[in-house]
Amino acid sequence: MRILSGVICVALVTVGCAHAPVREQLTPYQGEPVAGLEGVTFDGEVFHVPDMEPVSRQDVQMLQFQAEEGPEGEGEAGQEGALSELAQSLLERGRAMAEQYPGVCGVILVDDGEFVYRKDGTSVYRYHFAGLVLKEEAKGWGQFSSGFTEGRSRVQVEFARSVAPDGTVRTLTPDALKVGSPSEAMQFFNPNQKVLSGVIPGVEVGSVVEYCYENERYAPEDPRIFFPGYFFQGTEPVVLSRARVVLPKGVTFHYLTRHFPDEASQEPVKEEGGGTVAYTWTIEDSPPLV
């Protein structure tokens, strides 16, 4: 059994759901998957499926979403602007990890997060992800979603794409992004909570899914509060996992790290310049949790 490693400054929770033209497939623990569904909802206890009896949460193994075929929001297919330089440089290492851990659903190539706290109390979180899809289950990486709070924060997608085994690139276009509401429980605590979501087209077994987005908190409730948090390990192997926290000089930063592979890696690399101080943790070639 392996222990989850992470740097924790606070617990961070993101609630997401898909709001895009998709079809659903419900996979029970017993029986055959039910494909081609539309409008499946979940109330916290049971799944409500049109023209079917409600299905208990305990009886459902997986609910998958698949983009409908069609040109709307899919972007143009092509060979230009495939992977980022970072993702491309890690691809061969990712394939080697796939051979090292047979049976995994996918290999995460890039898991890179940056938290920037500004002098005025506003902050930005930038996240870059790239993953090699090895099984159907990992196609869920193509379901992009990021939460934000109306009037206080906003999300901007820098890019979101899939690169097929033959090199064909499919992009998630801005017009295909939808704004929806999260679960009723989250709305109860904060009615202004929203989710920006979309389906990255062209994701198949053998594809690489890559996206990058920013979440800016431009009107925080309390500008003195800044609580980033990060985890470096999960159920799939990770080639590169990195967390970076950037603060103005003079700001005291308290942090806690847990279950790192060695003492050296749990201490961040500290860099100063341009009126800021940056703390960076990097973990490479993380095995999957068993």
Image (cartoon, rainbow, N blue to C red):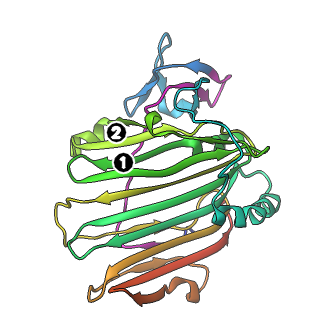
* Nearer to the camera, 237 or 47: 237
- Amino acid marked by disc 2: Pro
User: Where residue 112 sits in the image (x, y, percent)?
Assistant: 53, 66
The answer to whether residue 2 is seen in the rendering is: no
In the image, what residue occupies the spot 62% across and 36% down? 76
Tell whether 170 sits left or right of 168.
left
- Looking at the picture, tell me which residue is in the foreground, 276 or 135: 276
Residue 35 tag number: none
Mark 1: few, some, or many residues within 10 Å (few <14, many ≥20)?
many
Q: Residue furthest top?
A: 51
**CA–CA distance between discs 1 and 2?**
8 Å
Left or right, 215 with reference to 102: left
Amino acid type at image mark 1: Gly
Residue 4 appears at what percent x and percent y? 55, 67
Q: Which residue is mark 2?
A: 182
Q: Which stretch did the figure color magenta?
A: 7-34
What is the quadrant of the C terminus in the image? bottom right
Residue drawn at 45 percent across, 21 percent down: 39
Q: Residue at x 19, y 69 (%)?
A: 223
Secondary structure type for disc 1: strand
Label the magenta part by its dominant secondary structure: loop
Q: Where residue 176 sits: x, y (%)?
A: 47, 34
- Callout 1–callout 2 Cβ contact below 8 Å: yes
Taking the view exactly as shown, the residue that stands out farthest to the front is: 80
Residue under pointer 1? 147
Question: For residue 8: magenta?
Answer: yes
Badge count: 2
Q: Earlier in the sequence, mark 1 or mark 2?
A: 1
The residue at 63%/60% (across/down) is 84
